[in-house]
Image (cartoon, helix red, strand yellow):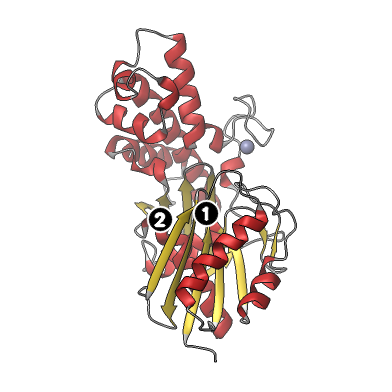
Amino acid sequence: LTEDIILALDFGGTKRAAGITRVGSYGWESIRSLAVPPGADASTDLRLMYTLAGELLDGRTPAAVGVSFGGPVDFEAGLVRLSHHVPGWESTQLRQILSENFNAPAAVDNDANSATLGEYRLGAGRDCRSMIYITVSTGVGAGWVLDGRVWRGRDSMAGEIGHTSLDPNGPICLCGKRGCLERYASGPYIVEDVRRELSDEPDQGQVLRSLAEGDINSLNARIVAEAAAAGDSLASARLRQAAWALGTAIGNCANLMNPDRFVLGGGVTGAGDAFWAEIRKQARRTSLPQVNFEIRPASLGGQSPLWGAVLLAEELLR
Ligand SMILES: [Zn+2]
């Protein structure tokens, strides 16, 4: 028997989450998440998700399944190209696999697009027509909503703002190109640069050193943000560079697409008021004076991809 419920699945960076809602009701009936164990591959990853979903469904059949996936997805084909986090996902027909497993129609999109849809309909983008959502976390990704619809592009690759170049002669990025936004603004690169500066300059970064309890290998982006808030000049300078990069990219996007709003989420955006002020200042400086826009924090927190998955599933029922 098919129940009046939607199953939403989120294959995120470090955890797997599943939630169930009634069709048309935007509150969780139940939600569960688990950390991905080290050494997981695609098949253990999928089994983990089946375990979570099985506990929530308790024998029921969902009306539809929506999926947010952390890696490039061909939306039209329902095909996962690869995972950014777990090996073995290359060219997986995830939509078909899930549809057969749950005996329900399924839709799969990348996590940036899912989070964009979630924020647009239920979060910080609710009252606008066009919006760009940017997640600044382990990577930097984005999704576009133009006149109410997610814009995915020819290859479902639209929104790769993290690999737009801010300096073709800049530092090399993991994608092989130079001076990408992601190279300046993602958490791992911020931490990498801060560690190197701490080793090169033994007199600098005293707040950082004390927050890291003397072990600079224990640093993470959250600690860098805390150190900046506490007045550490090395941490502040590095975050100012990240904010400069984000503001420049946002100003360029504003000139190109003239959206109502930019919504920013992800761990790095918790870096405080000075960080946000620098983003806004640089975005304004980069964009033309006639181009108006707002920059706001995401409001669904870590749940925006999972809510987006609910909305993806609902579109299948229309
Ligand atoms: Zn890159």
Badge 1 is on which residue? Answer: 12
Q: In the picture, which quadrant includes the N terminus?
A: bottom right
158, 260: nearer the viewer: 158
| Horizontal arrangement in the rendering, residue 144 relative to residue 239 (left or right) | right
From where the camera sits, is residue 209 visible? yes
The three-letter amino acid code for the residue at tag 1 is: Gly
| Image spot of residue 308 (x, y percent) | 48, 67
Mark 2: amino acid: Gly
Identify which residue, 252 or 98, lies in the foreground. 98
Q: Is mark 2 within 8 Å of ligand 1?
A: no
According to the image, label 2 marks what residue?
302
Left or right: 276, with 257 as reference point: left
Residue that protrudes farthest toward the left in the picture? 230
Q: Are marks 1 and 2 in contact (CB under 8 Å)?
A: yes
Q: Residue at x 35, y 74 (%)?
A: 27
Crowd class of label 1 (few under 14; some 14 to 19; many from 20; radius 10 Å):
many
Residue 276 rendering spot, x and y as whole percentages: 33, 41
N-terminal-most mark, 1 or 2 = 1
- At x 34% / y 42%, what residue is drawn? 270
Counting from the top left corner in percent of width and height, residue 144 is at 53, 59
State the SS at label 1: loop
Split into quadrants, the picture shows ligand 1 in the one at top right
